[in-house]
C-alpha cells in the first residue's frame, strides 16, 4: 500500500475529531517515530510503499486517535526542553508552559553553580531532568506520591543520563523536608473540578487525575503546604518556583506573601499568568 493512501485514510477517519492540520501533523509524527519517514521524505517520494506490519502499526495508532488517546501515549514518548521523555498513563504529558518554568530557573541559577534543587511532584521527571542536564554541578532530588510515576521518571533519568535522587512521598503528609535547598520547584495539581468543562478528552480521559485535580473548595492546598515546607528548608537566598493556575494567580501570590515571601509572577507563551517565584529575603 502507498503511504499516501494511508494519509488519506487518516484524514477521512479523523476529520470530525480534529482540525485537518492537526491530523496531518499526527500522521507525520507517527511515520517519523515508527518508520523514520518525515513529511519531506513523502513529498519527495510520493509513491512510497509501506508493508503489512507498517499498515497495522498505523491502523492501531488511528484507533487510539479516534478515542482521543494522546499522540504522546501512542508514540510512547515526547520531547521536552529538547530532551526525550517516555510517557504513559501514569504521568502527566509534559506541557510547553512548563518548559518556560525550567527556563526561568536556568536564567537565575548559573551553570557552574553547585547547589541543591528539589522538584516536588515530579511525574515524568521533566523538570528535574532538564535542570540536571543543564546544571551539571547541582544536586537534584525529586519527590512524587506515585510509585508508577517514579518508575517512569527513573527511566527518563537513565535515558537522559542524569543522576537524580528520587523519593516516594505524599507531600500533604510531610511534616518537614529533609535537608536544605537552594531551589524548590513544583508543578502540583491545580485544575479545579469546575474547570473540567474547558478541557479536552485527551487530558480528561488519559492524563493521571492525581497529577491534575484539586477540590474547588481548596485549590491551593499543594501550594500552601509546599510554601510552608519551603519557608523552613530554603537556604537564605533560596528560591521557590511554582507553575500555577492562571485563574488563581493573585490568590496564590497573596498566599505566598502571607508566609513572608517576596514574589514575582510571569506569564506563559499563551499570555496567561502561569509561573510564580518567591524569595525570603
Ligand atoms: N497545565 C496542565 C493542564 O492544562 C495542568 C497541570 C497541573 O495541574 N499541574 O492540564
Image: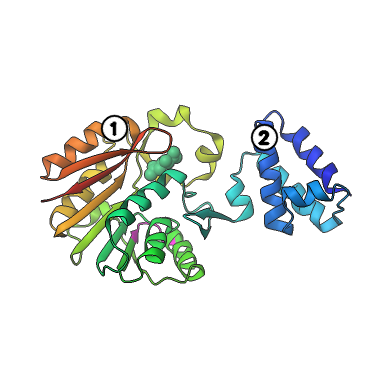
Label 1: state its secondary structure. helix
Q: Which residues are magenta?
A: 143-147
Residue 137: name its quadrant: bottom left
Residue 240, position as x, y percentages in the image: 23, 51
In the rendered structure, find residue 21 and report the number of the disc placed on it.
2
* Residue 248 in view here: yes
Residue at 48% from the left image edge and 71% from the top image edge? 158
Label 2: state its secondary structure. helix
Residue at 41% from the left image edge and 29% from the top image edge? 195
Q: Is residue 17 above or below residue 159?
A: above
Around disc 2, counting alpha carbons within 10 Å, would you say few (fewer than 14), some (14 to 19), or many (20 or more)?
Answer: few
Residue 118, position as x, y percentages in the image: 28, 61
Residue 143, position as x, y percentages in the image: 33, 60
Q: Is residue 201 magenta?
A: no
Q: Earlier in the sequence, mark 2 or mark 1?
A: 2
Q: Is residue 181 above or below residue 73?
A: below
Residue tagged 1: 248
Quadrant assignment for ligand 1: top left
Residue 63: name its quadrant: top right
Residue at 60% from the left image edge and 56% from the top image edge? 76
Closer-to-camera residue (10/114): 114
* Residue 66 in view here: no
Position of 143 with respect to 96 (left or right) is: left
Residue at 25% from the left image edge and 42% from the top image edge? 221
- Disc 2 to disc 1, C-alpha distance: 33 Å
Amino acid at each position: 500500500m502507498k503511504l499516501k493512501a494511508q494519509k488519506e485514510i487518516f484524514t477521512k477517519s479523523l476529520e470530525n475529531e480534529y482540525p485537518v492540520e492537526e491530523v496531518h501533523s499526527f500522521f507525520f509524527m507517527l511515520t517519523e517515530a515508527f518508520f523514520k519517514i518525515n513529511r519531506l521524505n513523502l513529498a519527495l517520494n510520493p509513491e512510497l510503499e509501506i508493508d503489512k506490519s507498517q499498515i497495522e502499526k498505523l491502523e492501531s495508532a488511528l484507533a487510539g486517535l479516534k478515542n482521543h488517546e494522546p499522540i504522546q501515549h501512542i508514540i510512547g514518548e515526547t520531547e521536552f526542553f529538547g530532551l526525550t521523555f517516555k510517557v504513559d498513563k501514569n504521568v502527566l504529558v509534559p506541557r510547553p508552559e512548563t518548559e518556560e518554568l525550567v527556563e526561568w530557573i536556568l536564567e537565575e541559577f548559573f551553570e557552574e553553580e553547585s547547589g541543591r534543587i528539589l522538584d516536588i511532584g515530579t511525574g515524568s521527571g521533566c523538570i528535574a531532568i532538564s535542570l540536571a542536564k543543564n546544571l551539571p554541578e547541582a544536586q537534584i532530588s525529586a519527590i512524587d506520591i506515585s510509585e508508577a510515576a517514579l518508575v517512569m521518571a527513573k527511566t527518563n533519568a537513565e535515558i537522559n543520563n542524569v543522576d537524580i535522587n528520587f523519593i516516594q512521598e505524599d507531600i500533604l503528609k510531610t511534616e518537614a523536608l529533609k535537608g536544605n535547598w537552594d531551589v524548590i520547584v513544583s508543578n502540583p495539581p491545580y485544575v479545579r473540578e469546575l474547570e473540567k468543562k474547558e478541557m479536552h478528552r485527551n487530558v480528561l480521559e488519559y492524563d493521571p487525575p492525581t497529577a491534575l485535580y484539586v477540590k474547588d473548595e481548596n485549590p491551593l492546598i499543594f501550594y500552601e503546604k509546599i510554601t510552608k515546607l519551603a519557608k523552613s528548608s530554603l537556604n537564605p537566598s533560596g528560591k521557590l518556583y511554582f507553575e500555577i493556575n492562571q485563574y488563581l494567580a493573585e490568590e496564590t501570590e497573596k498566599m505566598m506573601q502571607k508566609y513572608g515571601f517576596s514574589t514575582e509572577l510571569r506569564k506563559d507563551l499563551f499570555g496567561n499568568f502561569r509561573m510564580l517565584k518567591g524569595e525570603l529575603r
